Amino acid sequence: MNIAAPSIENARPFTRACVWHKLLANKIVEVAEKIKKLGQDDPRRIVHSLKVGLALTLVSLFYYIQPLYDRIGENLIWAVMTVVLVFEFSVGATLGKGLNRMIATFSSGALGYGVHYLATLAGEKGEPIVLGFFVVIIAATVTFVRFFPTMKTRYDYGLLIFILTFTLVSVSSYREDKVLRMAHQRVTTIIMGSFIAIVTCICIRPVWIGEELQNLVANNIEKLGNFLQEFSGEYFKISEDGQPLSDKPFLQGYKSLLTSKNTEETMANLARWELWHYRFGFCHPWKQYVKIGTLTRQCAYKIDALNNYLNSKIQTLSEFGSKIQDPSTEICSESGKALRELASTVKKMNQPTSVNAHIENLKTASEYLKFMLDTYHLKDANLQDIIPSAEVALTLIDVVPCIVKIADAVHELASLAHFKTPATRVSP
Amino acid sequence: MNIAAPSIENARPFTRACVWHKLLANKIVEVAEKIKKLGQDDPRRIVHSLKVGLALTLVSLFYYIQPLYDRIGENLIWAVMTVVLVFEFSVGATLGKGLNRMIATFSSGALGYGVHYLATLAGEKGEPIVLGFFVVIIAATVTFVRFFPTMKTRYDYGLLIFILTFTLVSVSSYREDKVLRMAHQRVTTIIMGSFIAIVTCICIRPVWIGEELQNLVANNIEKLGNFLQEFSGEYFKISEDGQPLSDKPFLQGYKSLLTSKNTEETMANLARWELWHYRFGFCHPWKQYVKIGTLTRQCAYKIDALNNYLNSKIQTLSEFGSKIQDPSTEICSESGKALRELASTVKKMNQPTSVNAHIENLKTASEYLKFMLDTYHLKDANLQDIIPSAEVALTLIDVVPCIVKIADAVHELASLAHFKTPATRVSP
């Protein structure tokens, strides 16, 4: 449908209304489809939205039920705010924000009360000066502390709330006589709100960010494995056909890895808050996942080079090319197997079993390919015929140490996190 | 100093105290040095911290000065909160949060009042049910809307505040009779707080995130240029020396590019809020910076491959190697010049002048190198001698289209943003 704007302007009012009506209907359908897709891509988003609604209803009950309201009164507003601000998609993020908020409110409330006490000693005229002085000093200091990378990653929200509560308590203490009561009520309601948010988040279909990170890292390793396992087949096929490869989706999977650094680091930081997860327990080595992620990404840069050869250099297979086909295929296939096993190790939290055998085969194949390249003697060949295959061979040789590093890091993870040894099946 | 723990345990109390004292002093010195370094790395951090303190003092004045307090009263608490929550390091982030907060508070306050009016129609018993129903529906819907990528990047904070204010107004309307007054006061104080935060942020040594993004993108292009300009010299030098290169810092500069995607996107999103910047004006094409950033990153992946050749393959220069030295050096030098000029174009917002000439030279050199590779005839050479140099040559040829793409994108930026033509100097 191609409706040009001028034709609408000149049309009769009825036609114009019809056209706008259709355009509006199309727009609505489009938005509805987007919403549907968003929900279908990850149904947990719908569940999360409903959970937020539920948590807010729970906290509103305190307003509606008289005996509950009598106890806390107007300050319930803080509990409502806490639920809205603390409730996040994953358990880790909710716990992190909730704990940060509770601890920061408590400590800064106490500090604010102390400063109020000091200020009252300074007399009526001195009080605002002392209060103002402390607000500037403490707010500026804590703001500066927020720039420390280690503080920023884990306690940024807590530091923000610290400034907030401290300023609120100390400044309003100038007008409010019952400072201690106010500080106490704020702490109570915030603990109440955090508690409601955390419980709702954990009890109803929780999204554990630790599991997400584990799956992400495992899937990334698997993507590399899939690429390598398909690569040799595709490369030597196009070489034989002399036809370019249409971009196949399973060969493009690795691309998301290239820029996943920040996501992985954020997830690892949030996962540390999930202290009570049944699978991981306390002190799970989350940093090791980031390390594996980094090694995987370095390997992905090389894979990217391989992918470029696949797309750009369409050559019929030279004599040299067919000579390196076997060891190259061997490297690809063994890499694929090793990486897939490593991915399953991370996902299922089992000790890796057959990885070492694949790695050994991989090393042997790589040595053999290197030997072939070193000893191949050029007779009367054209450089153009040799180079593309030689480049692929050299890149494959380069990929091998990357895979060995990933395997080492996964082994380290398995020992740090005490992965279980899978039960060996006894034949009946 | 190497003090083992057991020796402390067994020492006499006085010695023990001395040792702990020293350890503590060392720790304090260490932290102080970290703080100093953080401030020295970017002195604007100290300025920002003081600005936050100042803004809080300004907003506290309303508490301390009786006539001001009489007008607004207890609800001033919202202004203090707004200053703490809205004040960010850069103008773009502060404006974004401030505008989001003001608009969201205003619209959700109005909606909350409407829902309160509807609920009162339902009678005393029906009121909490109607209120609860609307809270669940609207909170869940808006939470779901936050998952839309376009909403998330620009309006996430506003949507959060929308849920917050709506819930507060509609829920507390059950207990408070003067809902309209409450909503009105909340809107006024939040506008006041946002205004103080924005004015302080802009008037005292502002950090414009648009400028930051511009510099980041320009510096990234420059880093690639520096690498390429140094590369050929270093590569053919090591080849002649047969000595490995120690990692030189100017050759490692490009590494930060590889994972800068998220930073650039966030900055471009925030820069859009800086509507009033004197240099950029309305509708500056911030998206184009992200595009240039992406192209720069793709080029950096290839540069990474070049860097690997520099570090791993130490070979004496073969006959073939010395043959390709001239065109390779030409490519590197022309790329370097082109990229540096492009960086300066972006930084100074001038139309590029001599870039096209460099690009033409670059293409010619690349064609020549390609021709050499195609026609070079291998006689009795060993593959091992040829491959390293050939790989470098092929990668350099691969880099050329990347640079052309970057140049095109910068030209597009220059025309979109109406960069000025530099005044041609007339000789006296």
Image (cartoon, coloured by chain):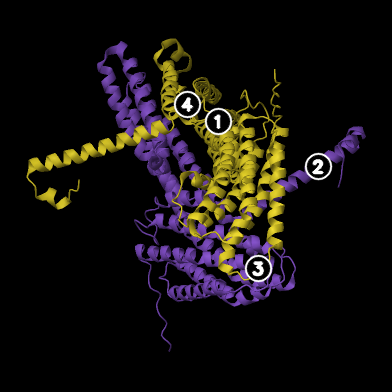
Chain colours: A yellow, B purple
Specify whether disc 3 shares its chain with disc 4: yes
Residue assigned mark 4: A83
**Image-quadrant location for residue B245:** bottom right
Residue assigned mark 3: A378
Query: Which label's residue is closer to the chain start, 1 or 3?
Result: 1
**Is B107 left or right of B233, judged from the image as shown?**
left
Q: Secondary structure at mark 2?
A: helix
Regarding residue B241, the answer to whether it shows in the image is yes
CA gap, disc 1 and disc 4: 11 Å
Regarding residue B60, the answer to whether it shows in the image is no
Amino acid, disc 1: Arg
Residue assigned mark 1: A101
**Residue visible at 71% across and 29% down?**
A418
Specify whether disc 2 shares its chain with disc 4: no
Image vertical order of residue A134 relative to residue B321, above or below: above
Residue B117: x and y in percent read 27, 22
Residue assigned mark 2: B23
Residue B361: x and y in percent read 48, 76
Amino acid, disc 3: Leu
CA gap, disc 2 and disc 1: 32 Å
Q: Are marks 3 and 4 in contact (CB under 8 Å)?
A: no
Amino acid, disc 2: Leu
Q: Secondary structure at mark 1?
A: helix
Between disc 1 and disc 3, the foreground one is: 3
